[in-house]
Amino acid sequence: MHGSLALVGSGEYLPAMASFEKSLLDDGVKNGKRAIYIQIPTAAGQETPDRLEYWKQLGKSQADRLGVDSIFLPIFTREDANNLEYATLINDCALMYMSGGDPHYLAETLVDTPLWSAMQDNWRTGTSLAGCSAGAMVLSSHIPNFRILKKAPSPGLNLLPEIRVIPHFNKFFRWIPESAAKVLLHVPDDSILIGVDELTAIVKRSGNDHWVVVGEAKVHVLKGLPDRQLVDGDEIKLTLT
């Protein structure tokens, strides 16, 4: 029994996303998990202490708003991700949330560590897993380099090997045609490329084989499936077969 899985364009911990994040918590609770909200800020691990405190308090405010406990895991380095004490804190939580920052640093920090193993184990037994922006990008087999588009993608965490995500799509890719994005991001023919707008998510609920769009904007299917734009409530199977 896998838990729910969410790819979020932006907006982690904001009031506008509270009802969506509550639904992910509720999914985990229905699967027998404890109503605990785990914040995983690793993608921001190279930012200043003030910024890390900002993320901590933003997540705590959201958990307080939802009436659940939160745990901020200070996973900023591979040493942290190898700390078994942090990995144990994840056990049987209802929601694990990887927030935004640098997706390449996030993947390099978590891959082949006890923390990532614990996250996968808990998701496979019913915990909801959400990734926002960098946290969404990192779940693919490869992560595109937005800042250096000519540079080849770097390895991701490979939970969703066929799917590649462009977060903040309506903000950062308004200036580039969708057809050009497919080429510049080095997306192979055996992959599905989607763009997820800000304050919008696409989620696969526990026990379902389709994904559902949630939020105020759109999800854009760019490659691997027929091009289309999806809005709140629309469903799609993100699979090549």
Image (cartoon, grey):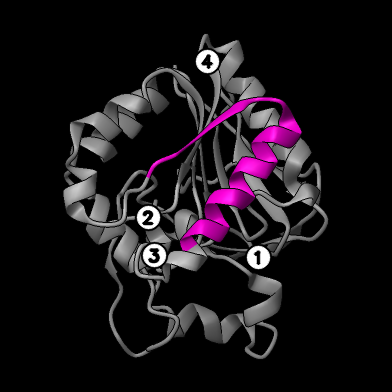
User: Spatial distance from mark 4 to mark 3, Cα to Cα?
Assistant: 28 Å
- Residue type for callout 3: Pro
N-terminal-most mark, 3 or 1: 3
Apparent side of residue 195 relative to residue 230 in the rendered image (left or right): left
Task: Quote the CA–CA distance across marks 2 and 3.
Answer: 9 Å
**200 to the left or right of 57:** right
Q: Which kind of residue does numbered mark 1 sit on?
A: Asp
Instruction: Give the SS element for disc 1.
Output: loop
Query: Label 2 sits on what residue type?
Result: Thr
> What's the residue type where badge 4 is placed?
Arg
Magenta residues? 52-73
Q: Which mark is residue 145?
A: none
> Which residue in the protein does label 2 denote?
42
Q: Distance between the residues labelled 1 and 2?
A: 33 Å
Residue occupying the point 29% across, 58% down: 107
In percent of width and height, residue 97 lies at 50, 42
The residue under the point 52% across, 15% down is 34
In this rendering, is residue 237 above or below 226? above
Dominant SS in magenta: helix
What residue is pinned by disc 1? 227
Q: Is residue 72 magenta?
A: yes
Among numbered discs 4 and 2, the one appearing first in the sequence: 4
Task: Find residue 193 and report its horizontal and vertical position in percent.
Answer: 51, 63
Q: Name the residue beneath numbered marker 3.
A: 103
